[in-house]
Amino acid sequence: MAIDLRERIDTSPMTRFQWGAVAICVLLNVLDGFDVLVMAFTAQSVSQEWGLSGSALGLLLSAGLFGMAAGSLFLAPWADTIGRRGMILLCLGIASIGMLASAVSQSALQLGLLRALTGVGIGGILASSNVIASEYASNRWRALAVSLNSTGYAVGATVGGIIAVVLQNSYGWRSVFLFGGVCTAVIIPVVYLRLPESLDFLLARRPAHALARINAFAVRAGHQPLAALPAPRQADASGPRSGVRVGSLLAPRQRRSTLLVWAAFFLTMFAFYFVTSWTPKLLVEAGLSADQGITGGVLLNLGGIFGATLLGALSARFALKRVLASYMVIAGALLVVFVPATVAVVVAFALGALIGVFVNGCIAGLYAITPSVYAPSVRATGVGWGIGVGRLGAIASPIVAGALLDLHWSPTQLYLLVAGALVLAAVAVGRLRFEAHAADARSADTPASVATH
């Protein structure tokens, strides 16, 4: 039976084929990290060429986030209808077109619209790639697989900054968009040839040739093929068979968990984008030099590369929900003491790196835990809406911080506010229940050493 295949994947050691699928998802996030921050990398050059005001440049910087929110909320849910792999291919096409066209844009308005288009594609990719990485990992390594996915974003942002500097110095800012567009387009055939469709999607939605596609995966993953598809599980058969089931996220049984997921994403992304966007400036206001402020920002990103991986490794041994809630509380505590620590630069830099570890780990943990909340038939919808609501927090973060600075809030007060947001997010995560998919629930709510027995 196919249910047996799903259980064998959950409890068996990971094969090279499964890790290969996870690696492709990580690569997608590396490209996303570059594509999302390409505007930040080129902001100064773009502003100089077109003589942009600060507010106009701010709109350009926000356009990609608005697009990502739209992609996560309205495009990603269709992955539950057309397939996660199909959605990734479609969104890669959208993102590559947006990036390539940005390289030849002739005005700030054109560039802003193209940044929004690129963001729509990225929003769809993130939701679907995280779901696939989760579904093709075993219980023991599921959190690590999704956390590695998030690490790809930090790697793309860090390496992308280096590449952007080299390209801009030699060929101008347009070459940075061209590079990102070409790289995004090149990965399309890799995804088409090497990334399998979600097993849970094939079982729940049963598209054409579902049995053959399931058996092709089973053989490549070292499992016995199936003689026939099993009877649909009740969770997958109870809802409509077509369309995007956004309303099902707020059905009576699911409403509580969905609202908690949305709250956790909104609060965590509010905190994350505040920390990554405002730390260099606020460090300068706290008394450090401009170069020291930039160094603090760089250390935050470098810490993020390790934070997601560490969370995944810890979650292979301890319950993911507890690890994630602990990350949020620790990150909040570090933010409370961060600004007072600027009296000693070395201590401030060390705390900055640690904050990067835990704040980035919080994002990775949310990506890892959210698929466990939803049944396979609405999983991409649930993850997409969680990320989309989180993007609203990301958009609100710089607006709120700027308004509070105009009201003469000190850096210490702002960091206290963000620390409080992370503690509230920890409360929301701690109250999550995992009822929709038993195998995922065990890996999220119990230590992996227990779940795999």
Image (cartoon, helix red, strand yellow):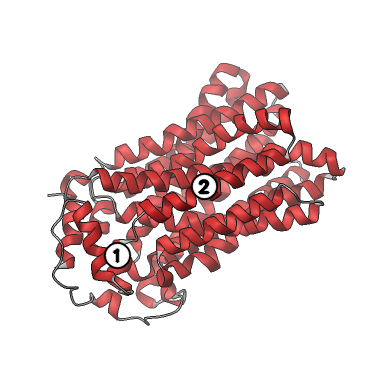
Q: Which residue is mark 1?
A: 200
On the question of residue 417 being in view, the answer is: no
Query: Could you tell me the amino acid type at mark 2?
Result: Val
Q: How many marks?
A: 2
Frontmost residue, 52 versus 19: 19
Element class at badge 1: helix
SS label for mark 2: helix
Marking on residue 431: none
On the picture, is 264 further left or further right than 41? left
Q: Position of residue 159 (x, y in %)?
A: 55, 32
- Structural crowding at the residue carrying mark 2, measured as other residues with C-alpha within 10 Å and reported as few (<14), some (14–19) or many (≥20): few
- Residue toward you, 253 or 223: 223
- Can you name the residue that lies furthest to the right here? 51
- In terms of sequence position, does the residue under pointer 2 or pointer 1 come before the other? 2
Residue 5 drawn at (x, y percent)? 17, 61
- Residue at image coords 64%, 59%: 117
Q: Nearer the viewer, residue 398 or 81?
A: 81
Residue position marked by numbered label 2 in the rendering = 186
Residue 434 spot, x, y in % from top left: 30, 61
Q: Are marks 2 and 1 in contact (CB under 8 Å)?
A: no
In the rendering, at what x and y percent does residue 162 appear? 60, 29
Residue 213 seen by the camera: yes
The residue at the point 77 percent across, 56 percent down is 110
Which circle, 2 or 1, is nearer the viewer? 2
